[in-house]
Image: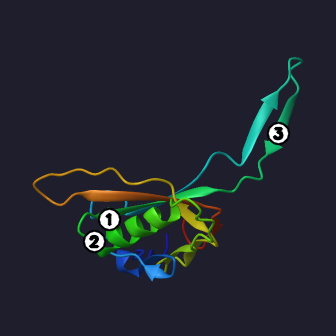
Amino acid sequence: MGNLTPANHSFQLVVASYGGVRISGFADQGDPISYAPNGEDVTSSQGPDGETVINKMAQRNSRLTLRLMAGSGSVDYLSDLYNVHRQPGFRGPYPACNVTDANTGSTITAAQAWIVGAPPVAYGSEAGVVEFVIEGGFLQVMRGALI
């Protein structure tokens, strides 16, 4: 069967930045960073006579979710940016967002991205997880593995 070399992965080689600032203090539970397109690229429509049309969507917005420890300095940074962006009269530009995985060479980037809402706040006996959802017209460049 041949020689199988195990793949190596280190989260230390995954770098996320927003507005040129490196995001840090990721939570250890679940997936600290996740990416998902907003909807489907291809849908179908069927007419009353049974004919089907394939619709190729031009909408390329996607969402990036960052799960951070509540005490992380990045929580303050992202919260401050969110509050600035929602001020009346703010017209942009919105900052760039990038995630690079040196393990696989995969990159996700958006020239402009925005935080979609304030994260929920919870108080407990231990520091919790704060989740920021960032949306943008993400261009996904994949090498080696799916993101």
Q: Quadrant of residue 11?
A: bottom left
Pair 2/3: label in front: 2
- Does the residue at mark 1 contact the one at mark 3 (Cβ under 8 Å)? no
Q: Secondary structure at mark 2?
A: loop
Q: Which residue is mark 3?
A: 54
Q: Residue 81 location in percent, x, y?
A: 45, 69
Left or right of residue 147: residue 129? left
Disc 2 to disc 1, C-alpha distance: 7 Å
Q: How many other residues sit within 10 Å of disc 2, few (<14), some (14-19) or many (≥20)?
A: some
Q: Nearer the viewer, residue 37 or 117?
A: 117
Q: Nearer the viewer, residue 113 or 67?
A: 113
Q: Label 1 sits on what residue type? A: Leu
Q: Label 2 sits on what residue type? A: Ser
Q: Quadrant of residue 139?
A: bottom right
Q: Which residue is mark 2?
A: 72
Q: Residue 87 location in percent, x, y?
A: 51, 61
Does 135 sit above or below residue 111?
above
Q: Residue at x 41, y 59 (%)?
A: 132
Pair 1/3: label in front: 1
Q: Residue 147 location in percent, x, y?
A: 53, 63
Q: Which residue is mark 1?
A: 68
In this view, the residue farthest toward the front is 89
Q: How many marks?
A: 3
Q: Secondary structure at mark 1?
A: strand
Left or right of residue 11: residue 137? right
Sequence-first tag of 1 and 3: 3
- Does the residue at mark 2 contact the one at mark 1 (Cβ under 8 Å)? yes
Disc 2 to disc 3, C-alpha distance: 46 Å
Q: Label 3 sits on what residue type? A: Ile
Q: Residue at x 81, y 42 (%)?
A: 55
Q: Residue 143 location in percent, x, y?
A: 60, 73
